[in-house]
Each structure stands twice: as C-alpha cells, then as structure tokens.
Amino acid sequence: MLLLFLNWLFTKYLWYLFGLFQVLVLKRICRFEFDTYIFMKQVTIKRPIESFNKNCSYAIIISGNKIAEINNGETKVIEVNDDSDEVQAKIYWCGSNKMSMDQGQNSVEITGNKFFNKWLPFSGSLLIILGLAFTINHEIAWLKTLGIVLMILYLFFLIGTLTIWKNQWLSIKKLA
C-alpha cells in the first residue's frame, strides 16, 4: 500500500518537479544570455510608392552582404551588426551609391532616380527621329552629318548610363 502511494505521489508530482527544474535552469541560461547579448544597430529602410520600377524589388546590401529585399511602398526595419558601415540598394546590375551609416538607429529612403527612371524611356522616340536623318533622301548634307553626330552622342549616353553611371539608377538618402 505504501508503495502504491509513493508511486502515485511520484508520478503526480514528477512533472511538477521536472518543470520547476526546467524553470530554474532556463532562468539561469536566460540571465547568462542577457549578460552576453550584443546590441544590434537598427536600420529603417523606406521605399515610397513609385510608378516606375513598381514591379521590381530592390536588394538591400549592407557591408557587401545582401540582407533583404524591399518592394514598392514598403518599409522595413533591419537589425545589423555594429560593425556594419555601408548601405546600398541594387536592382539588377544597376544600383545606388554606397552610403555610410552612423551609430544607433538610421532611417534611409531609397527611390529611383527621376531622370533615369522617368524620362530616359522616352528617349527611344529620339532614336526614331535620329533614324529619319538616315532614311530620308534629302539634299542637305549638314543635316545628315548632324544626325550622325547626335546618334553617336546618344549611343555613348546610353552605354554610359548602363555602365559608368550604373550606380546612379537609384537614389539613397538619410531621413531626419
């Protein structure tokens, strides 16, 4: 009878004792982790709603590592190490300039470059107009020469936009 009582007592309160043991051990572990916790720097990244690049997400690169992607009209708070010093946004092979971060919380806004993203697509019509200088049979020689010069300048501008000025496609600025 005594054995049945001890068996019942042991099985009933075993889970209680086990739970108390877990709480004591976990409390000690959590206190240890809190003492050695490394405080992270927070970066708030905002992308306003834009009509251009609206279907493309921007990759957020901090200190050379891709951390996150941000969609049109989205705001994200990202925790990074204290030794992180640069933030940059990328879209395909183009992107923004690198911006240095301060200590503490930073707020950053990433937008598309107004000229490259809004007006450059309309420059395709300029290509058609310049092409007319080659196709129209006319007697004015200087017009054809002017068309050739403008076409070469236009092609240099397009190649420069996609290669030399590729990190001007997006604009990144600190918010107050």
Image: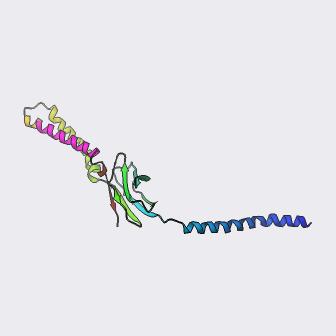
- Give me the residue at 56% from left, 68% from top: 34
Q: Is residue 124 above or below residue 108?
A: above
Q: Quadrant of residue 41?
A: bottom left
In x, y percent, where is residue 32? 59, 67
Residues shaded magenta? 145-166
In x, y percent, where is residue 12? 80, 65
- Residue 71 placement, left or right of 19: left
- Give me the residue at 36% from left, 55% from top: 88
Q: Is residue 102 above or below residue 163?
A: below
In x, y percent, where is residue 110? 35, 57
In x, y percent, where is residue 139? 7, 32
- Residue 142 placement, left or right of 119: left
For the C terminus, the image quarter is: bottom left
Q: Quadrant of residue 14?
A: bottom right
Q: Nearer the viewer, residue 143 or 67?
A: 67
Q: Main secondary structure of the magenta part?
A: helix
